[in-house]
Image (cartoon, rainbow, N blue to C red):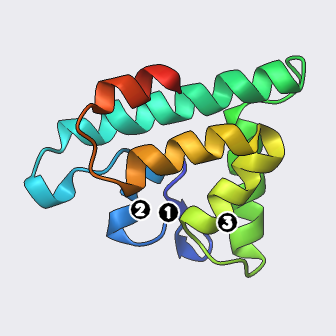
Amino acid sequence: MYQRSKEGVLYGESNQSWLHEGDAADKGQFGLYYTCGLLIHQAIDQEIKKKSKGLKNIYSLWNEYRQKVEQGDEKGTDTFLALVEQYTSKALVLRIKELVETKLDNPEEILSRL
């Protein structure tokens, strides 16, 4: 559902694969795609539902993301996280960036704070 639109691939470059499944391609650990991406998206979904009092969810965000990309916005992390911030909070976006942009000694601790 998330990966393609009329314009082709939506998630951006291969190092942004967490947008749809996670980010472990370089090591060939493809099972981690699903685990990492699922946890990130689950955290986003919970925050969206809470902030909107159940009126919106992760699909609402993805539908808007798809529309933005199809209308010419840049595909990838920047556009996606800008929407995440609008739908949730800057604090959640910062935690997501910490998880996906840095080498972590204890990724489980960061995941638990999502």
Label 2 CA crowd tier, 10 Å (few <14, some 14–19, many 20+): some
72 to 107, vertically: above or below: below
- Residue 114 appears at what percent x and percent y? 53, 27
Which residue corresponds to the image point at 71% horizontal and 47% vertical from the top-left? 84
Q: Looking at the picture, which amino acid does disc 3 mark?
A: Thr
**Tag on residue 79?**
3
Q: Would residue 75 appear left or right of 28 to someone viewing this image?
A: right
Label 1 CA crowd tier, 10 Å (few <14, some 14–19, many 20+): many
Image quarter of residue 33: top left
- Disc 1/disc 2 C-alpha distance (Å): 7 Å
Label 3 CA crowd tier, 10 Å (few <14, some 14–19, many 20+): some
**Tag on residue 11?**
1
Does label 1 or label 2 sit earlier along the sequence?
1
Name the secondary structure under disc 3.
Answer: helix
- Disc 3/disc 1 C-alpha distance (Å): 10 Å
State if disc 2 and disc 1 touch (CB < 8 Å).
Answer: yes
Which residue corresponds to the image point at 63% horizontal and 46% vertical from the top-left? 93
Q: Would residue 109 appear left or right of 27 to someone viewing this image?
A: right
- Residue 45 appears at what percent x and percent y? 66, 28
Q: Looking at the picture, which amino acid does disc 1 mark?
A: Tyr
* Residue sitting nearer the eye, 71 or 77: 77
5 to 58, vertically: above or below: below
Image quarter of residue 106: top left
- Residue 97 appears at what percent x and percent y? 50, 51
* Residue sitting nearer the eye, 41 or 64: 41
Q: Which residue is mark 2?
A: 16
Which residue corresponds to the image point at 73% horizontal and 82% vertical from the top-left? 72
**Tag on residue 102?**
none
- The residue lying furthest to the front in this view is 105
